[in-house]
Image: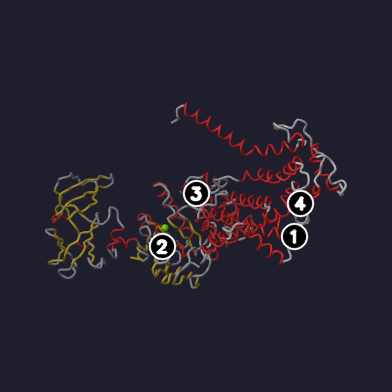
Amino acid sequence: MARITCAALTKSYGAVLAVDALELSIGHGEFMVLLGPSGCGKTTTLNMIAGLEEISAGRLLFDETEVTWTPPHKREVAMVFQSYALYPNKTVRENIAFPLRLRGQSASEIERAVGAAAEQLEITHLLGRRPNELSGGQRQRVALGRAIVRKPSVFLMDEPLSNLDATLRLSMRGLIKRLHQELKATFVYVTHDQAEAMTLADRIAVMKGGLIQQLDTPEGIYERPANIFVAGFLGSPPINLVEGVIAGGAFTRGDFRLALTNPPQEGRAVVLGLRPEDVSAGGDVTARVELVSPLGSETHLDVLAEGGVALTLRVPKEWRAAPGDRLSFGIDPARLHIFDKASETRL
Amino acid sequence: MKKPLAPRVTRAILLTLFSALFVLYVAGPVAWLVSSSLQSEAEITRVPPNWLPQNPSIANFEAIFSAADRVVTYENRRQGEALTSSFLPSGAANLLPAMRNSLVIGLWVAALNLLLSVTAAYAIAVIDFRGRRATLYTVLATRVVPDIALVVPLFLVIRNLGLINSLGALVVTYLAITVPFTIFILISYFEGIPRDLYRAARIDGCGHGRALWHVYLPLSLPALVASLTFAFLTSWNEFVFALVLTQNVAAQTLPIIISGFIMDFTTSFSFVNAAGVIAIIPPVLMAVVFQRYIVSGLTAGAVKG
Ligand SMILES: Nc1ncnc2c1ncn2[C@@H]1O[C@H](COP(=O)(O)OP(=O)(O)OP(=O)(O)O)[C@@H](O)[C@H]1O
Ligand SMILES: [Mg+2]
């Protein structure tokens, strides 16, 4: 059991359609990230895979076996929760040992497995404590320990890092990535943090309103967003979106013109997408600098170009600019994203 | 920042004062019960009363424990003078058997109550089945009817079952009275246990039975103890149903027998109070043993926020 197939997986709560006929096939050993804004159905999807949420319609398969109606304790998946969900009355050792105890393993086997997992997560010194004597990061390590100790082939994680502070999140992210490489298990990871999604995922499913908007590798999602929602959801600062029309093979908005390599039909109303970093020094676009935000490693510039087009640019820190300056920069037409205004899909 | 001294002192004084008043109000009758059980009848009825016995005597207790050996006949049943405390009510010998009945019934009710209400409360609080709200309201609705209205129908049912004057009749009746309440107590408690713990347990390999056993029960100790105590005490103190459903000492409980002492031709208050002292010993012991389990914060550290 390691390949997960969702076929028209649907969950409705009364009139609310939380997950709408989801089609998703997750390969053996793949790290799949479900990414999307709050309320888009990520947790619901994960819980259906885990068996914690009854499936309203559709089918769920682990490899070739249908598990749509299998109760969670028979599905042999491990799960890590945003809230850690440690058993407060048990010590760390007992928490990690619990899944093994339920499977009736011998005391010596359990002892060995718990020791190994604790060592891997560097929590050996915490084994005797209770959850309320641990910090958030330590608790999440224990929760990971409880998951890996069973050596399951499927790991489900629901925003496991979102209760941790930024530094800790970074190191835990590395830990999870390492675990995935060592365990060679299938991971399904829910997050609304794009940086987590980009760094961890083999593939990302971007969700909204219970539907998958795009399913692709992190690069694919970033480089070729399927629609305006996906384009806007990934990237920081977010992609610049400018409404305009196609005229003379160029994107036009008032006096603002950008020649396109592969223009859609004339007169079409479109939305132009420009990633803040896709600009180069020296070029034929000029704009007035409005706001300068130096970040140390790079600088963010808010500029106003012709036609009242406001753009945010992400530029190397060497670009010296002050508010009020005139700035010239180049835009590579090959790196532009053009979306249809009406359907919001990529052209 | 510390509050200024004056308000703190005032606060402390007021708190102490009202606590003392409250303790007096609650413990006063009990203190009098204990004190008067050690006094002679003449001393009890004296005005003003003595809070502390002048000549403490355990004659009443001796009488209770020796009553079984004493043969009560028509001739000697009125023997003894109430005022000199040598008087013994005719039913005195029934006191200890009744206490045994009360204990047996109370323990059965407490145990079965827990078994029934824990499983029912888990199902209603945790499992998302069709009609769970309706189930809960139906269970609770049975307690809207005053007990007294149920006495006659229950009597008929129990009589037709041939259970009149049996301990089982009272056990069943008391379960019917207590289980709805304890289900309700436990449901609220179970619902307060983070849902993610249930999810984690299911994922880790628990079916419903094991999730209940390994996760819900250990974390619900205070509610379990409260339910147990409630069920036992209700059964221990109940009067109306016991009066109707039992007819002789084979199944009669303590409240029935004790109340019988004041319906006798002569009433010995000191003896009744001694019986009262004996009747409150098991509940008091229970409270002392269980109070340390009634603590909060068992789920601390389970989940974030
Ligand atoms: N028990 C429920 N009853 C009714 N509606 C629900 C229930 N659980 C979830 N929903 C709805 O289903 C939708 C999807 O919820 P879900 O928890 O899957 O979102 P999510 O993507 O995990 O969001 P978040 O990032 O905030 O955790 C939401 O609109 C939510 O309101
Ligand atoms: Mg969620």
Q: Give the label, 4 or 2, closer to the camera.
A: 4
Q: Residue A261 appears at what percent x and percent y?
A: 18, 66
Q: Position of residue A50 (x, y in %)?
A: 49, 63
**A115 lies above or below A226:** above
In the rendered structure, find residue B166 and report the number of the disc placed on it.
1
Judging from the image, mark 4 belongs to the subunit labelled: B
Closer to us: mark 3 or mark 4? 4
Q: From the viewer's perspective, is residue A190 above or below residue B21?
A: below
Check if mark 2 and mark 1 are on a common chain. no
Label 3 vs label 1: CA separation?
A: 55 Å
N-term-proximal mark, 1 vs 4? 4
* Label 1: chain letter: B
What whole-number distance in Å separates the C-alpha atoms at marks 1 and 4?
12 Å
Which of the four quarters of the rendered structure image does ligand 1 lie in?
Answer: bottom left
User: Pointer 1: residues within 10 angstroms few (<14), some, or many (20+)?
Assistant: some
Position of A43 relative to B83 (above/below): below
- Which circle, 2 or 1, is nearer the viewer? 1
Asked whether mark 1 lies closer than 8 Å to ligand 1, one says no
The mark found on residue A139 in the picture is 3
* Viewer-closest of B3 and A23: B3
**Residue B87 visible (yes or no):** yes
**Residue assigned mark 4:** B98
Secondary element under disc 2, as helix, strand or loop, is strand
Name the residue type under label 1.
Ser
Residue matched to label 2: A32
Badge 3 residue CB within 8 Å of ligand 2: no
| Other residues around mark 2 within 10 Å, as few (<14) / some (14–19) / many (≥20) | many
Q: Secondary structure at mark 4?
A: helix
Packing grade of label 3 (10 A; few <14, some 14-19, many >=20) is: many
| x and y percentages locating residue A10 in the rendered image | 42, 69
CB within 8 Å, label 2 to label 3: no
Considering depth in this image, is B83 or B290 the residue closer to the camera?
A: B83
